[in-house]
Image (cartoon, helix red, strand yellow):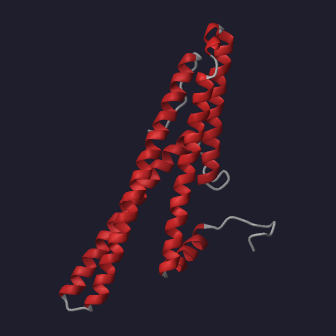
């Protein structure tokens, strides 16, 4: 029950069972596609909000540039904003403390995982389309082969949208890494280690 206070996270096998059940119907597939679209939007929105907060700090007061201590404080606030954003994104993408990764590694893993998933899904769609053509050549039901072809095209389309989202997220992550390195340099600190 959604309203109960004893809500726990699903483990991977439970999640897969539910996702498979939903994927069996057209409305279920539409629902899963909409959930994925909204989740990607939330990740991107979080990154954009973080960048907007950083922009506000940078442009807030030109007088700060005359006071080195105030500037140092502003830079430290920006660094804290980046760290907070990394923590927020890590909380959204991984179960609590699941793998002990830093925020930087989590962001990079998020982008790499999206790229890898898109590639795997495209390969599966290709295999499905090839199977449809093989079935068609052996005299299998043409209508069934056409359904498989159409489903593969839907998957290709969804993957292209996912790929665009992953590219945008990758650019946002690169911008955060760049800002973090510049802030660390301005504060005379070593840049945080970032997974490449």
Q: Is residue 100 visible?
A: no
Q: Is residue 47 visible?
A: yes
Task: Give the quadrant of residue 150.
Answer: bottom left
* Name of the residue lying farthest toward the top: 66
Percent of width and height locating residue 36: 52, 62
The residue at the point 49 percent across, 74 percent down is 29
Which is more toward the observer, 98 or 173? 173
The residue at the point 29 percent across, 89 percent down is 143
Asked whether, in this view, residue 114 is left or right of residue 50, the answer is left
Asked whether, in this view, residue 140 is left or right of residue 19, the answer is left
Percent of width and height locating residue 6: 79, 67
Task: Give the quadrant of residue 190.
Answer: top right
Percent of width and height locating residue 92: 62, 52
Query: Which quadrant is home to the N terminus?
Result: bottom right
* Name of the residue lying farthest toward the right: 5
The residue at the point 33 percent across, 73 percent down is 152
Residue 137 lies, with reference to residue 161, above or below; the image says: below
């Amino acid at each position: 029950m959604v309203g109960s206070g004893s809500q726990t996270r699903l483990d991977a096998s439970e999640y897969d069972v539910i996702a498979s059940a939903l994927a069996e119907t057209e409305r279920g597939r539409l629902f899963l596609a909409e959930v994925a679209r909204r989740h990607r939007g939330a990740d991107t929105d979080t990154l954009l909000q973080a960048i907007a907060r950083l922009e506000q700090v940078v442009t807030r007061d030109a007088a700060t540039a005359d006071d080195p201590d105030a500037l140092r404080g502003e830079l430290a606030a920006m660094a804290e904003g980046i760290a907070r954003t990394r923590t927020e994104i890590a909380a959204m993408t991984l179960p609590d403390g699941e793998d002990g990764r830093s925020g930087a590694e989590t962001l990079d893993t998020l982008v790499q995982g999206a790229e890898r998933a898109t590639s795997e899904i495209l390969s599966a769609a290709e295999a499905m389309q090839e199977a449809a053509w093989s079935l068609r050549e052996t005299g299998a039901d043409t209508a069934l082969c056409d359904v498989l072809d159409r489903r593969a095209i839907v998957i290709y389309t969804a993957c292209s949208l996912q790929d665009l989202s992953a590219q945008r997220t990758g650019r946002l992550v690169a911008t955060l890494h760049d800002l973090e390195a510049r802030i660390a340099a301005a504060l005379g600190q070593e840049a945080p280690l970032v997974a490449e």
